[in-house]
């Protein structure tokens, strides 16, 4: 019979896999009920069902948390670890909410979303992604800075061309930043767009530069991922020797 | 004179190539008539022509299916193979429709689309694509999961910012998911877009992350394809020795 | 003093470079006047100026054509070459238009655009692009086929979901193809978009697949270009030995 | 105690780092006040605060400029260097504006944006980006030319199909260029889109080609960046020997 420690901390034994699957299913269900709660015109009975499920899931996550603390070799190590804090944060709001009435504070509900990070525990592939980010970190930061500068310049430029004809949409550089975001990411909602000849020519040049700046990080991540995969394969080969 | 087996199963003999071209032309014509049938206000004579062509093409596909069963070395092998099932599925609906009146069930017509998969038989390049998917499978699944989580977080976030001012478009997390899909894929229809300052800043940050997540799989597929091509070339070189 | 042949056919002598620059300037000017002619409400004097410039440029291109025929070693070789035909096609419409009145045939004017291909003569980089296309030809064709099949399936699917509620926009599979093109390329004009829950979920899945298919060819071209550059550099290195 | 020269010109000593951070903070604050000034309906007191900050920052940048001139080994070298000119251009407009009243010339304010280039001094990663542009320069120019030609052809083509039905939006080739920019970059604002069958089929083919042309440069920059990174690493390895 597997020990309690094995069931909770390992994921390659039958017991451990079953425990992990239960927790994952509970997380996904808990996120779905979170979404259902936002539906307008919910019936009273549906609301009480959702409330009951929420209480049930918090109890389950609390039991999980206490068990993880119980089996952790140095108990402190788990409590102060990344996942220890995440596990606590995803149940704490509920208990605080029992004492004080927090239903009025809408954003308080969002704290329940910390549960989504609990899923990260189960993904081995996230390690490789971390390594890829490490490889391309410098360039990604450079391109994020370039993106911010480009957005700012685009906003200032379009403000210069369009602010007189469309004071509502392009009234200040801050208004124009929304246009810059929607345009340079090529989303193009169509709520704001230039109508002057100068503004359109300026848009063309910003897009020429912008496309080459904003879509580069994706290419960097992709090639870094390929590199990280090769390093990992090489690492496995060495481990296997 | 080539044997019947050669004409039907091989594609590098003159007879086989002619047979393949006929079947392919019939598939394409059959898909075009499928599209034409959806046109509103078709004249009676056009409808009867389309019906006649449909009957003709089903007869041709049936003959093809029977011939393929006839020439297959172990007949069972073809019947239970992927293309055997596809070939059957693309004619079966017609014969079932003769017995029961299925015209009322609109989605039943869609089964005819299985014919499109019959084309896959003729594409040698699909093998390479399969191999590329195999190489990048792990990362593609990771990125699909990341996409789903990102869409969920984007929907929850925008719901927080916009649900009060635009209850019609951002009323629940499910409504917001549609915005998240249209925005993070950069389609940006313009039917729903944030109007609050908070929502717009949130959109900017989601797009910064989203562009780097959603467009990465394409890069992975492209580099995996290049790798698969090299493996294939190497394989051919070894075969040629 | 450089010979006439050198001036016309070579581009690394001072005379040849000057001749090339004149022709290129004339092509660009000729394309700009083509665009200006489409402006509505042109004054009579502007129209006569444009007409005069058109006659002048045709005369210049005719002289260029005759000179190229004159200096070509086997005259036939130039006349039947790709650029020989392009050079002829870009002046021929004018002379035919003198005999018959072709002003009514609007599309006839478009033949003047053949001049744009004359520019290709001067671009050494196009050779490398040709080589890149050669390397990635097979995959590009595969992805073009995949794009067409995907657009067709997307159109059939959205027709199934939306045709009842929006008969105007999604009335037939052909109407839906326009939606499919605008959506899967992420242009998203916003003139047609799904409004049913089923149609929106379907759009999400088509976009998930579509983004991975439609943006792959660009990655293939980019990596093939890099490869072609390496081959060329290697070729130059061997030539230099 | 560090010398004045070290504080100003070097960035790896504590004093130098503090000096650099002050200047950077001042640049960012100065750009934010630039944006705030464009807000409509600013109160009088806010305007006087902004004016005071502008005077303060110009004084600070002037002191920085004079210090940099003072410590530069050959004073001339700094004054005529790229950053010397940028530093001068970002304060000069203010002093000229004191003599002549330039408030009426709106575009004059834009000269203050030269300060953004002062940030470039502090980014070591820009060197690598420069090297990447050098590597891919030839292809990037080729693709920019291809983009311009493609936009022109797209504009001429759509003008042919749509000008009769939508004379307002597609009246001349110049009007159509705006459609071409918004479509081929996949922004798709939705202010102009084809409505004829011919125009829509033409749009499809232009997008097929356009996506493969316009998104290639980003791929080229990404792969060139990876290459530049390798060269730099190799260079560092050699330096370290």
Image: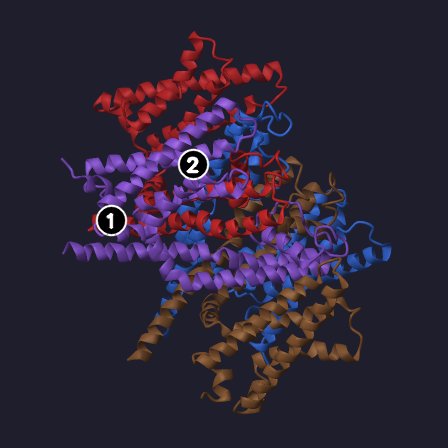
Chain colours: A red, B blue, C brown, D purple
* Quadrant location, the N terminus of chain C: bottom left
Q: Residue at x 31, y 79 (%)?
A: C240
Question: Does residue D164 sit above or below C114 in this rendering?
Answer: above
Residue toward you, B212 or A122: B212
Label 2 and label 1: CA atoms lie apart by 48 Å
Q: As drawn, is A218 to the left or to the right of D2? A: right
Residue toward you, B79 or D107: D107
Question: Does residue B75 sit above or below A232 in this rendering?
Answer: below
Query: Dot 1 corresponds to which residue?
Result: A235
Q: Is residue D34 visible?
A: yes
**What is the chain letter for disc 1?**
A
- Give the label on residue A107, or none: none
Residue toward you, C116 or B25: C116
Toward the right, the furthest residue is B44
Q: Describe the element under mark 2 as helix, strand or loop.
A: helix
The verdict on a common chain for dots 2 and 1 is no
Q: Describe the element under mark 1 as helix, strand or loop.
A: helix
- Quadrant in the picture for residue D235: bottom left
Q: As drawn, is C165 to the left or to the right of B171? A: right
Q: How far across and down, in percent of the image, does residue B28 sit?
A: 66, 61
Q: Residues within 10 Å of mark 2 (few under 14, many from 20)?
A: some
Q: How far across and down, in percent of the image, does residue D102 sit?
A: 51, 40
Query: Dot 2 corresponds to which residue?
Result: D31
Q: Residue at x 52, y 59 (%)?
A: D212
């Amino acid at each position: 019979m597997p020990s309690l420690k094995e069931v909770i901390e390992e994921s390659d034994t039958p017991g451990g896999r079953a425990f992990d699957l239960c927790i994952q299913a509970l997380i996904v269900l808990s996120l779905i009920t979170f979404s259902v709660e936002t539906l307008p015109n919910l019936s009273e009975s549906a609301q009480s069902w959702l409330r009951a499920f929420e209480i049930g899931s918090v109890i389950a996550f609390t039991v999980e948390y206490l068990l993880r603390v119980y089996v952790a070799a140095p108990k402190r190590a788990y409590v102060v670890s990344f996942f220890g804090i995440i596990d606590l944060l995803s149940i704490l709001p509920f208990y605080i909410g029992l004492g004080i009435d927090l239903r009025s504070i809408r954003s308080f509900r969002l704290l329940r979303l910390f549960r989504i990070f609990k899923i990260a525990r189960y993904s081995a592939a996230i390690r490789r992604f971390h390594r890829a980010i490490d490889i391309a970190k410098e360039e990604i930061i450079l391109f994020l800075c370039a993106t911010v500068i480009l957005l700012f310049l685009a906003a200032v430029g379009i403000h210069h061309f369009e602010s007189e004809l469309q004071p509502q949409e392009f009234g200040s550089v801050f208004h124009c930043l929304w246009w810059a975001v929607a345009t340079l990411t090529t989303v193009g909602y169509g709520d704001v767009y230039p109508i002057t000849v100068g503004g359109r020519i300026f848009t063309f040049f910003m897009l020429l530069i912008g496309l080459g700046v904003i879509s580069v990080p994706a290419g960097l991540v992709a090639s870094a991922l390929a590199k990280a995969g090769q390093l990992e394969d090489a690492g496995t080969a060495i481990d296997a020797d």
